[in-house]
Image: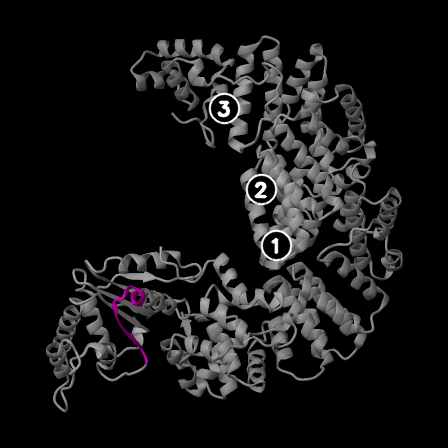
Amino acid sequence: MYKTGLLGRDRQVRVLHELLGRLPAAGGALALRGGPGVGKTALVQALAERARVAGWRLLEVAGGTDDTPFGGLRELLRPVLGTAESPLPERGAVLRSELDGGSGPPPDTRRVALAAFNLLTAVAAERPVVVVADDVQRLDRPTRDVLAFIARRVDDQPVVVLAALRGAHTLPGVPALDVPVLDAPSARRLLARHAATLPPAVRERILGEALGNPLALVELPTAWRPLGAPGSWTHLPVNATLETAFAAGLGELPDQARDALLVAAVDQAGDLSEILAAASVLTGSTLAVDVLDGAVAASLVRLDRTTLRFRHPVVRFAVLGAEPQTRRQAADAALAQVLADQPDRRTWHRAQSVNGPDDELADELADAQASLLRRHGAAAAVRALERSAQLTTDSVTRGHRLLGAAEHAYGLGRVRLTHSLIEAAEHQRLGTADRAKARWLREISDAEPQLDSARAQVPPDIGELSAGDPELALDLLLSAALHVHRTGADPAARAGVVEAAERLTPTNDPRRLAALALTEPVRHGRAVADRLPSHETDRYVHDADGTRVLGMAAHAIGDPVRAVELLGRAAPVLRAQGRLGLLAETLLTEAADQLLLGDWPRATRLTEEARGIVAETRQPAMVAALAGTDAIAAALRGQAVRAQELADTAAAWQRPDLVPTLRLARGVAHLGEGRYGEAYDELRPLLDLPPEGLRRQGFAALTPFVVAADRGGDRQEAARVLAAVEEAAQVTPAPLLHIQLPYARAVFAADAAAEGLYLAALDRDLSRWPLVRARMEHAYGHWLRRHRQAARSRALLLSARTAFDLVGASDWAGHNAPAGADTPLPSVAELLSPQETLIARLAAEGLSNREIAERLYLSHRTVAAHLYRAFPKLGITSRGELAPLLRPPGADGPAAG
């Protein structure tokens, strides 16, 4: 394929290459169609360059150079019009006579078109002709008609016509190829080429505002200049190239239309009645919607009955950039005047309309930030608090508001903005509480956390703040608990956090519960579990922060079912508020629990969304956590090499908090390869701890550890380890632990007791734990086979195999399984005759014997006889057990026939 270096344009380049490939035997025509700046000109130029390289005659024209009738056609055909030097003077003379009618009637367009077509075909007889016309919508109308006439007739001539048109314009009868905006990866790569030296916050803002438009991605970095702190930008600067491409008609609009556009640009809500009302205030006269007709005709805005939308954010930037600051402030003041029923927005626009300090307005804006967060997201709250700080005269209050903005910026995942706001706050006179808050914000937002366990002590501020600022005290407590959890701090540090938590109230605050769960999940697991919400009417269902932290607590104490419910409630709110930093953590935590619960498709979706957020917000600390989650997923799927590679990637970050995750990933990966001794050695440290020292990853490692110990480990040592786990189970109600313990008991039991334990374990409600059930069925099925009960084993083993196949999990059979323990299991088709198989499938669908008989033209007694013979072969006793055995892998409903 011909290479152009145009990112994200492989399909368009391929189509153009195929079009040129028709020459010289035939020709063709194509219209490129797309919005301003999408790269139509770049594609036209790529094709023109290809024509030059091939030695074909190239004829070019672009709209906007000559708008007289046939002016574009004259420009296009000038190189081949009949002159003394022309090889075809007669043809050129005919066309020139049509075009140069002097003072007589205007030339007949059809006659001109026919003459032009004849001229091109005559020229093409010597060598192929390539006609390229850019910005065709700006050519004069007669030229467009002639171009369409020619384009419709060149298929059997050595002539190619390529036209580029903006928006919805077309050439009648000519095939069109849409040129869309770039996809996200291509847009990011193109921006990287042109904005490598810009700060990350600027690059991300440009990426978001460009909406994949190539010209915007190239020119916005060129035009950029600082307009204040990143959180306070209302628009990005534009240059002449962008103004010409996106807002060429702006300067020609009447003053009232420009006033309306200015109001719309500072408003951003898009409410048409609101915009017209504020524009009427700004102009001093009542305006109707027809004042915007010129802007619509110039493709600057789109209108419907109630809303106004700019065609592209760059149009809005051009409108704002064309006006002085005083005019923008006047537009904000006009909007504030008409927003009496929306106090938070009214306050915001009033704040934008003033110069210098204004404490009363600053207080109003600070009070409005909670409403702005709820309605417009965290970015609006950051802007509100930062602007409030700018209007504030008192240094202490100013610093407090800057720290509030920094806290919201952290939630957005904007680490650099968070740190810049903290630094700005630290230049103010901060009180004791705010100094503690600044330290806390630095700790939680550190791009590469300093995991020195010496720093894991409880901040002395907690006790001092517990009375004066209990909210901040709870924030500091949770921060200390997270640090203890991540560093594996010594018992004294953990005890300090617990002691501080026990002094704070309220006792059911999510941060206090999470602190206890993270620090001592066994010892305090029951107290935390008792206080977790159990239904959607609980207090924190609409509080994203509280729900997220409660989900974190459920995750830490080993309750994945409640964790995914809570985290799943928090994520949509965080997503709606734009709090991407916290959202990425929430998604990864839920994904880790969904992997254990067997909902791997959802875990994959969560992980992929988190991966996109981490790439967008550039959170280095999340990269290692993402690799750890990926390593667990790969290990569970039996992708041992991939799991080891990902574990090594995560290990390079040297994060103590990820060591248990990586041990679990490596241990499970070894199981999949049949390296049971190595799996045992990797997994044992997660469980060989004092009962109170067990953590969630130890709970998750229980079943893999038992498999490894049973097949290649030290059973005596493993029994000692499991005894300590049983002690922990007496203290904590962790479902992740209790759901697996019956498996461990059955596997390690003497033969006389084993079957009873297997049956009791399978009799529990395991509907939320399909992998646990499958492991149990797999183990019990093999136990039955070892005890010469093959018929009874078949249903269990087939059910387990089906579950593994449905999820995509490894059965941990490995390559070194005990002889006869994991021999291939015969399929249903191998166990039953074709007739028995067909009847069994229909029965699994729910058909009665008589219905099956009618369908197969048999008697119902014959159907019953076939099923009677089939049941013992499959090791089952009833029709209800057929569906799991006959359901195709990947099916979710009843077995298909």
Is residue 56 located in the magenta-colored stretch of the structure? yes
- Of residues 571 and 281, the one drawn nearer to the viewer in this rendering: 571
Q: Where 525 falls versus 21 (above or below)?
A: above
Q: Crowdedness of circle 2 by 10 Å Cα count: few (<14), some, many (20+)?
A: many
Residue 806: which numbered mark, if any?
A: none
Viewer-side label of 1, 3: 1
- Of residues 349 and 695, the one drawn nearer to the viewer in this rendering: 695
Q: CA distance from mark 2 to mark 1?
A: 16 Å
Which kind of residue does numbered mark 2 sit on?
Ala
Tag 3 secondary structure: helix
Q: CA distance from mark 1 to mark 3?
A: 40 Å
Circle 2 residue: 603
Where residue 737 appears, as percent x and y from the top left, is: 72, 31
Which residue sits at x=52%, y=70%?
Answer: 269
Which kind of residue does numbered mark 3 sit on?
Pro
Question: Residue 61 vs residue 817: left or right?
Answer: left
Circle 1 residue: 614
Tag 2 secondary structure: helix
Q: Where 98 falls versus 828 (above or below)?
A: below
Q: Crowdedness of circle 3 by 10 Å Cα count: few (<14), some, many (20+)?
A: many
Which residue sits at x=55%, y=43%?
Answer: 604
Viewer-side label of 2, 1: 1
Where residue 851 appears, as percent x and y from the top left, is: 35, 19
Q: Where 738 falls versus 448 (above or below)?
A: above
Where residue 615 appears, as percent x and y from the top left, is: 59, 55
Q: From which residue to which does the magenta span run?
A: 51-64
Q: Crowdedness of circle 1 by 10 Å Cα count: few (<14), some, many (20+)?
A: many
Which residue sits at x=15%, y=76%?
Answer: 87
Which residue sits at x=53%, y=68%?
Answer: 194
Residue 884: which numbered mark, if any?
A: 3
